[in-house]
Amino acid sequence: MSDDFELDTDDLKRRMDGAMANLRTEFASLRTGRASASMLEPVMVDAYGSMTPINQVGTVNVPEPRMVTVNVWDKALVGKVEKAIRESGLGINPQLNGTIIMLPIPELNEERRRELGKVAGQYAEHARVAIRNVRRDGMDQIKKAKADGLSEDDQKFWETEVQELTDQMIKAVDTALEAKQAEIMQV
């Protein structure tokens, strides 16, 4: 009856790639001792009555390896931007210079490096869970097709396809985590 069943593996791969892209964004926000404009991406500022990304209220620059600057466009928002950075959990103490907020990036100590390594591990685990959820969705589609008359051979074929895709993506997460942890521990 359902010999024409075709699992949309492209959709599953796209959703798993979304989990990987999210992981890369979270990794970019982790501080590694080097200044990076992307470390401020998760910071949201209460501007004009709504939460706004920091890069929409000012220009984020990296003038030197251990310094990030935020040139706030509206003088009325300088205090709110400074407060948002302080409360972001980045461990950076902003310094005001007119409408420019300077963020000196301190050298990371061993304890903080280990903490950041654990945080990276948590981010990676969230990505693995998201990938496994996509896998579960694919397996559920296959089970439903089996109930509709999909042959056992076809069922095994599709289950193998989904599992191989899942294994490949989990391996990519593990590789990205190892690279990030190595970057964090680098002095």
Image (cartoon, grey):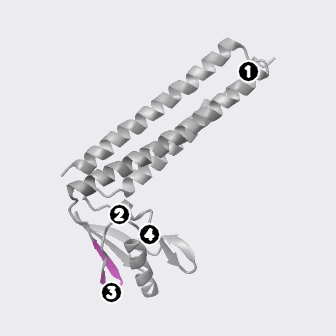
Quarter of the image holding residue 42?
bottom left
Quickly name the residue at label 2: 37
Quarter of the image holding residue 173?
top left
> Which mark, by number, is residue 98?
3
Tell me what residue is drawn at x 52 percent, y 29 percent: 165
Provide the residue span drawn in magenta: 96-103
Q: Pointer 2: residues within 10 angstroms few (<14), some, or many (20+)?
A: some
Q: Please indicate whether residue 163 sits to the left or right of residue 29 in the image.
A: right
Instruction: Say whether disc 2 or disc 1 marks the residue closer to the N-terminus.
Output: 2
What is the CA distance from the residue labelled 4 to the residue labelled 1?
50 Å
CB atoms at circles 4 and 2 under 8 Å apart? yes
CB atoms at circles 3 and 1 under 8 Å apart? no
Instruction: Say whether disc 2 or disc 3 marks the residue closer to the N-terminus.
Output: 2
| Residue farthest to the front, as pictured | 111
For the stretch drawn in magenta, the main secondary structure is: strand
Q: Secondary structure at mark 2?
A: helix
Instruction: Say whether disc 3 or disc 1 marks the residue closer to the N-terminus.
Output: 3
> Which mark, by number, is residue 55?
4
CB atoms at circles 3 and 4 under 8 Å apart? no
- Res 166 seen here: yes
Quarter of the image holding residue 149?
top right
| Residue farthest to the right, as pictured | 1
